[in-house]
Amino acid sequence: ASGGLGNLAFKYDSANGMTSLGSLSGNKSSVAYGVNVDGSVIVGIGYDANSNTQAFKYDSTNGMTGLGFLTGGSSYSAAVDVSDDGSVIVGEARLSNPDLDYRAFKYVDGTMTNLGVLAGYSDSYARGVSGDGSVIVGFLESSEGTQAFKYDSTNGMTGLGFLTGGSNSYANDVSGDGSVICLLYTSDAADER
């Protein structure tokens, strides 16, 4: 949906049709990226009153709420997925270091937590969370390439490696209980599997 100064996120259901989710600032853009299993929680990005890109959570009780930024981070965050019950939101946020590196985050009970990065990588991006909220997946990035990761509270962040002959991997989604992870593998820029 389009309105004000940009595009607006929307939800669609058979009873109400297409409904705008609005925006964080009242007249700027928003984009939805994920929805929980019963459709009650939607996550994405919006532009706040300071024109910063900020992760949001939307529900019918509170409307669109900004999730803020990482402590000590710069003014960019994006929410891309949400657990089945809407309690765990994942995405990435930018640090305020000179390189403006990105870090995967989880957002639970009002707190955005930096999931870190493995040695040799500069950035991490979360792309999915299990239905029960226990496993987060995504990818790490460096000047040499990318590697899929899995994160859980017991083991922290673990690199998932590559297929034989591969040089890059990305984790895009994860099953409800966290036991199966969907990956994209590339051996070079032109070869995706």
Image (tube, rainbow, N blue to C red):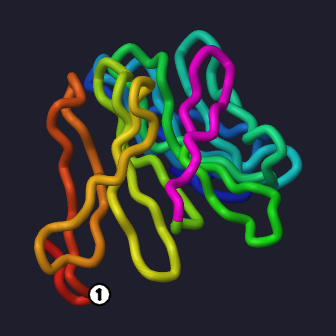
Q: How many marks?
A: 1
Observer-nearest residue: 141 or 40? Answer: 141
Q: Locate residue 90, reporting x and y percent.
A: 49, 37
187 sits to left or right of 99 = left
From this viewpoint, is residue 12 visible? no
Observer-nearest residue: 170 or 17? Answer: 170
189 sits to left or right of 28 = left
As displayed, is residue 181 above or below residue 187? above
Residue at 20 percent across and 69 percent down: it is 185
Q: Locate residue 188, reporting x and y percent.
A: 25, 87
Q: Amino acid at mark 1?
A: Ala
Observer-nearest residue: 119 or 135? Answer: 119
Q: Locate residue 154, reporting x and y percent.
A: 40, 24
Q: Give residue 157's quadrant in the image.
A: top left
Instruction: Assess whether residue 179 is covered by the magenta stretch.
Output: no
| The C terminus - image quarter | bottom left
**Label 1 crowd bin: few (<14), some (14–19), many (20+), radius 10 Å:** few
Which residue is label 1 attached to?
A: 189
Residue at 19 percent across and 32 percent down: it is 175
97 sits to left or right of 91 = right
Observer-nearest residue: 183 or 50? Answer: 183
Residue at 48 percent across and 16 percent down: it is 87
Residue at 14 percent across and 80 percent down: it is 165
The magenta span reads 105-119
Instruction: Assess whether residue 106 is covered by the magenta stretch.
Output: yes
Secondary structure of the residue carrying tag 1 is loop
Q: Give residue 85's quadrant in the image.
A: top left
From this viewpoint, is residue 37 visible? yes
